[in-house]
Amino acid sequence: MIIDCHGHYTTAPAAHTAWRASQLAAFREGRPSPAYPAISDDEIRESIEQNQLRLLRERGADMTIFSPRASAMAHHEGDERVSIEWARACNDLIARVVGLFPETFTGVCQLPQSPGAPLGASAAELERCVTELGFVGCNLNPDPSGGRWTSPPLTDRYWYPVFEKMTELDVAAMVHVSASCNPVFHATGAHYINADTTAFMQFIQGDLFADFPDLRLVIPHGGGAVPYHWGRYRGLADMLHKPPPSEHVMNNVFFDTCVYHQPGIDLLFRVIDAGNVLFGSEMVGAVRGIDPETGHYFDDTKRYVDAAAGLTDADRAKVYSGNARRVYPRLDRALRAQGR
Amino acid sequence: MIIDCHGHYTTAPAAHTAWRASQLAAFREGRPSPAYPAISDDEIRESIEQNQLRLLRERGADMTIFSPRASAMAHHEGDERVSIEWARACNDLIARVVGLFPETFTGVCQLPQSPGAPLGASAAELERCVTELGFVGCNLNPDPSGGRWTSPPLTDRYWYPVFEKMTELDVAAMVHVSASCNPVFHATGAHYINADTTAFMQFIQGDLFADFPDLRLVIPHGGGAVPYHWGRYRGLADMLHKPPPSEHVMNNVFFDTCVYHQPGIDLLFRVIDAGNVLFGSEMVGAVRGIDPETGHYFDDTKRYVDAAAGLTDADRAKVYSGNARRVYPRLDRALRAQGR
């Protein structure tokens, strides 16, 4: 069984995206938000069948841990009320996708974060999504300011309401920023990767997992720069008088395989234990084209994992499904109930 | 011959560092800066002989392209006047090191950047250092705000006064941030690496090298996250309708070898042409300890380059000196004059 841990609903129906634009316009003009539009099951079905579902079948994966479009979370827009409405609309739409394709998609929610706002509303929305919609996790944005980086590090108590609720519900989070409103940071080319690297270094510096020994966090995009600079991180941990990252961080932190070339995936598995890597593609996502060097889609990451040197069959089974079922135990229970 | 392109004077005499503290205290209190202290040649000699020179000899390199301590540039402190004084003091000290060890060190200057300030003073200090002190390049900080990222991208005309002066003088720059005053970013574990990644993506998005076809920029720390995510960058260039990075960026951009483990260095050379890689160690620098897995210093990067799979002798000659002599032609001329 092959579970893609990192898929976004980048192909949501146009009416959903248009509503967001009108919601933000209303906010700017001091008007109440417009009513959310009617979207038919057929529209949702079509948006999935022609995109994510087609690609899953073509590439040979079985299911996707599915969340709202990351770049559209845009927590820096509007205010907390606007974020609460938008997160709810996005999460309800994901729930409809899961309802239409229950064997192929499982839900992960967007949180109603807003720069400077406390995280009570995020904990509440997480609880609603897990207990009422059957979701298995959330995406946590370490920089709701969108490239201004005004929040404290993830190890700060500011974030604890979400970590406490995650622990209570036994769900995982992917640490995932959204769009950048800072012109220095290209979203998918700089801001995403920087956030991954930044979060990992915060975990080295802090002691978050002493307070939350069962917390499970997925750092996407292959862990940002971390595997390439694994020696630097081991050395910095030593300089900071922290235990090695393998003991201090990697019991709670996992990387996905959203690394779009064979040498990168090979490096990932050369330095990171296969027990810490979850298969992911970020599709339909950041990089949509075909690699002229291989003739295959850049984001067809299954090809790289299949070809990765030195991976045993047991390792590959962990990467393709075992780790995901361990990190997302609610997904594992749902799969068992389906006899999978 | 082996040239280390990335060394900082992290061991400068205590009086130099103490002066900086008193300069900043005077700034905060509205007093004029104190007089710069007397530092003897013996103090400088000792600070170098016991550190950089000893390590160069032990590890088998011949010379270092040497610049002021990067984390101490701290362009976010004080104002432009304070940065001008501090850059001058740091650069004059580098010139004294070069004067005492002319066969082993060549100078690269710190620029008197200040958040929001135009770059005229930086161009002037660069000219002074090159024409009066014999320096061969500069360190350019893409984020003088120290982790607030308030400057425009490096492709913006804001930066052109420095690029014009670099072109006129035929010198290269290393793109190197300084300390972070933003608690989310650990300096050497996140801010440095993020800045490298960010700069590279800006070069993909922009068209800087159409305006400056002879500009040469070194992105340190192995190019940040870029080689690990090389497929992502090739794919993003394609999505942005830009030529491949190998044509659009890599005629002007070089990476160093400050990657502190063998798998990282192997990846670097697997994806980046050896003509674009300059040997560097960043020592005495970011990571000072011994890797328990190898028994050698993390930053003894020559070991990794020596052991890198698939590098020919011709490649290794480029990496160890040929590329540095091409990127820093004033260094090449000086070496030729020494018969080297």
Image (cartoon, coloured by chain):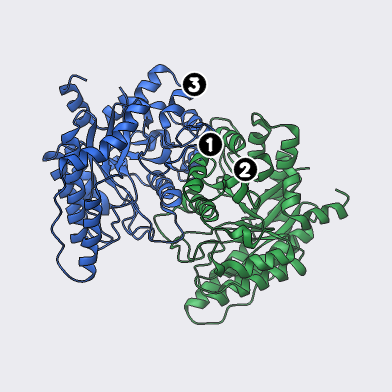
Chain colours: A blue, B green
Q: Say which chain tag 3 marks.
A: A
Q: Residues within 10 Å of mark 2 (few under 14, many from 20)?
A: many
Image position of A165 (left or right of B185): left
Q: Are marks 3 and 2 on the same chain?
A: no
Which residue lies under the disc numbered 2? B257
Image position of B121 (left or right of A133): right
Instruction: Point out the frontmost of discs 3 and 2.
Output: 3
Q: Residues within 10 Å of mark 1 (few under 14, many from 20)?
A: few
Which residue lies under the disc numbered 1? A292
How far across and how far down the image is residue B105, in percent? 74, 54
Which residue lies under the disc numbered 3? A310
SS at badge 1: loop
How far across and how far down the image is residue B169, in percent? 74, 65
Nearest the eye: A201 or A84: A84
Question: Residue placed farthest to the top in the image?
Answer: A313
Q: Say which chain tag 2 marks.
A: B
Circles 2 and 1: CB distance less than 8 Å?
Answer: no
State the quadrant of the N terminus of chain B: top right
* Quarter of the rendering containing residue B55: top right
Three-letter amino acid code at the position of disc 1 = Pro
Q: Say which chain tag 1 marks.
A: A
